[in-house]
């Protein structure tokens, strides 16, 4: 009887190693919170905790200096910077990159896309890249003498123009680096169709896809787990998903779509994901003990 109990314990730990132990993560909504002003201190704090840079030869201080030089206020008032090349040149210093098969686009579903990427499909949105971790949920317009003008940073016209140009440039680079089998999380509950004519996904990301992309899977998500909020399905007329199919076909990219409500449910947003390696080490040590004792 003792040997059977011991054998069962060993088999259990071997099974745990195969599956990897797991932990629960938080739930999702479709979108996110208010932004912070991107001061130098905020930039450096985010940069130093953003992980591995795609340009390791440039320090966070170097990047701030380049950022401040690139986006000097063009006048004494809060006039926006309209030279798009400034945004494009800075983005190229730290382009948003993801591994093969790991790119996740979205439109109107920011928070849900982030959670689905982390917990359900193992893909990364632009906010999960080095560039994204620095600039996500920030607002800014221009600098004066190397210091962010905080007044202009909350000016709707100035900041709005800067953020639109910046994220358009970043999204173009994000799309150009996509390889393999990316996915896109689109809003199935909004009044406007999932493939909106004016979205960055439609106007910038899809046109910027390269021949390195094999196929794209669209994931439609819904408010409130789809209860009374399903406006668009994969086959809904006027969803413009047929236009997305055509746009992808022109690039020799295969199109797939799912409107499975699992992606809008807590089963996805509270998905099981691997815990830190300490648990794996514990399992390995236990299995080793079992092997030695059996011998």
Image (cartoon, helix red, strand yellow):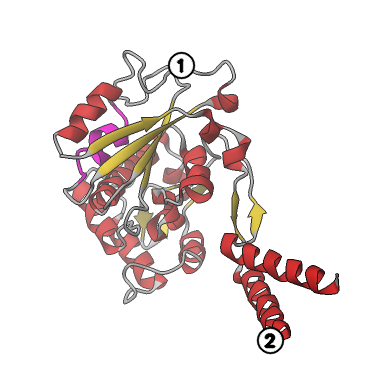
Residue, x 79% and y 69% (percent of image)?
4
Q: Nearer the viewer, residue 228 or 2?
A: 2
Q: Residue 58 at what x, y percent from top left?
A: 33, 73
Residue 18 locus on image (x, y percent): 57, 63
Q: Which mark is residue 214?
A: none
Q: Residue furthest top?
A: 237
Q: Which residue is mark 2?
A: 295
Residue at point 25% right, 54% down?
177
Q: Are marks 2 and 1 in contact (CB under 8 Å)?
A: no
Secondary structure under tag 2 reads loop
Specify the quadrant that holds the C terminus. bottom right
SS type, badge 1: loop
**Residue drawn 32% across and 31% down?**
199
Residue 113, given in percent of the width and then of the height, sits at 47, 41
In this view of the protein, can residue 252 be seen by the observer? yes
Q: Nearer the viewer, residue 229 or 271?
A: 271
Q: Residue at x 60, y 25 (%)?
A: 224
Image-based side of 160 in relation to 111, left or right: left
Name the residue beneath numbered marker 1: 231
Location of the N terminus by quadrant is bottom right
Q: Position of residue 97 (x, y in %)?
A: 32, 58
Q: Nearer the viewer, residue 199 or 176?
A: 176
The stretch of residues the image draws in magenta is 198-209
């Amino acid at each position: 009887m003792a040997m059977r109990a011991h054998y069962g314990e060993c088999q259990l730990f071997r099974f745990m190693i195969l599956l990897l132990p797991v932990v629960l993560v938080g739930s999702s909504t479709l979108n996110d919170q208010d932004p912070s002003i991107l001061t130098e201190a905020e930039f450096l704090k985010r940069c130093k905790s953003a992980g591995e840079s795609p340009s390791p030869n440039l320090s966070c201080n170097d990047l701030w200096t380049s950022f401040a030089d690139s986006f000097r206020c063009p006048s004494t008032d809060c006039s926006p910077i309209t030279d798009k090349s400034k945004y494009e040149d800075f983005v190229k210093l730290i382009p948003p990159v993801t591994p093969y098969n790991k790119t996740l686009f979205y439109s109107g579903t920011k928070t849900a896309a982030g959670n689905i990427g982390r917990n359900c499909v193992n893909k990364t949105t632009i906010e999960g890249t080095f560039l994204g971790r620095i600039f996500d949920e920030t607002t800014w317009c221009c600098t004066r003498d190397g210091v962010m003008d905080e007044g202009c940073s909350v000016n709707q016209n100035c900041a709005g123009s800067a953020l639109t140009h910046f994220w358009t440039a970043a999204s173009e680079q994000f799309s150009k680096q996509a390889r393999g089998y990316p996915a896109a999380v689109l809003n199935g509950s909004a009044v406007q169709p999932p493939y909106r004519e004016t979205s960055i996904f439609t106007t910038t990301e899809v046109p910027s896809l390269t021949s390195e992309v094999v196929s794209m899977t669209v994931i439609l998500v819904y408010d409130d787990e789809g209860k009374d909020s399903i406006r668009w399905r994969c086959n809904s007329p006027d969803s413009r998903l047929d236009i997305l199919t055509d746009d992808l076909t022109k690039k020799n990219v295969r199109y797939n779509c799912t409107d499975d409500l699992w992606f809008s449910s807590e089963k996805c947003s509270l998905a099981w994901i691997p815990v830190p390696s300490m648990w794996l080490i514990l399992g390995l040590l236990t299995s080793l003990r079992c092997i030695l004792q059996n011998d």
